[in-house]
Image: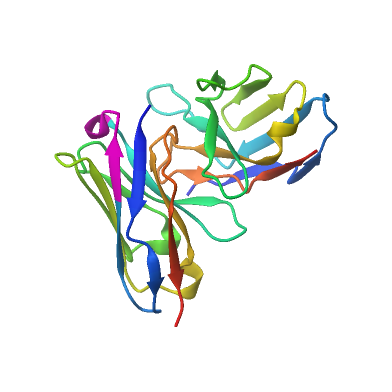
Amino acid sequence: DVVLTQSPLSLPVTLGQPASISCRSSQSLVSSDGNTFFHWFHQRPGQSPRRLIYKISNRDSGVPDRFSGSGSGTDFTLKISRVEAEDAGVYYCMQSTHLPSTFGQGTKLEI
Amino acid sequence: EGQLVESGGGLVQPGGSLRLSCAASGFMFSNSYMAWVRQAPGKGPECVANINEDGSQTFYVDSMKGRLTISRDNAKNFLYLEISSLRADDTAVFYCTTGWGKIWGQGTMVTVSS
């Protein structure tokens, strides 16, 4: 199964400052049809994960534009331009190019 | 926006079996890749099984292979997961989700303990 490695695992940030999370894959996530099924999620305690970004850089409906995703192949990044209090929680990357899908180990954003 | 509602979790003795169900509504279930994801207490999510749109292809995480069966009933808009030979370290919240993770259920707790 594909291994996703996130860094850092813990990210202390100040309100209004930027934040960046990296996710590296053990193999290319480009599928045979040219798509890259790589996504980012946010989870608060006691809640189900919520998808923020799909296929590298597409924001889901209702996700603020301070969130952006980038990358290709095996290296991907989630950026928050200006952190707000509601952004606290754990961020996970996930790939669904190679099944079964796999998740990164998570990055805890602490404000 | 679609909805997924899981059921079937509970307290099970080691070595026992469970069948989890997931009711889908509000989206084209029969056109959707689906997955079961488990999350142990204090841990990150782990996808344990995927199934394609018509149920002809299934994928399982190596650590649980042989103990899982994922299936679906597109006529009833239901997804299922059968788990056998349950162990204490299977204790987790099990979520039903669409293949790319757009829609998640609230999860059903499975506790394996004597």
Q: Residue at x 35, y 50 (%)?
A: B6
Q: Read off the magenta span.
A: B22-31
Coordinates of residue A95 in the picture (x, y in percent)? 50, 37
Q: Is residue B90 above or below residue B36?
A: below
Q: Is residue A7 visible?
A: yes
Q: Is residue A21 visible?
A: no
Q: How is the image coloured?
A: rainbow
Which of the pair A107/B41 is nearer the observer? B41
Coordinates of residue A21 in the picture (x, y in percent)? 71, 34
Q: Is residue B114 left or right of residue A107?
A: left
Residue B81 quadrant: bottom left
Which of the pair A101/A30 is nearer the observer? A101
Coordinates of residue B12 in the picture (x, y in percent)? 38, 74
Q: Residue furthest top?
A: A65
Quarter of the image with the C terminus of chain B in it:
bottom left
Q: Is residue A49 left or right of residue A98?
A: right
Q: Residue furthest bottom?
A: B114
Q: Is residue B73 left or right of residue B5?
A: left
Q: Residue B23 magenta-drawn?
A: yes
Q: Residue at x 28, y 44 (%)?
A: B23
Quarter of the image with the N terminus of chain B in it:
top left
Q: Is residue B20 above or below residue B4?
A: below
Coordinates of residue A14 in the picture (x, y in percent)? 85, 32
Q: Residue at x 65, y 22 (%)?
A: A67
How many dots with numbers? 0
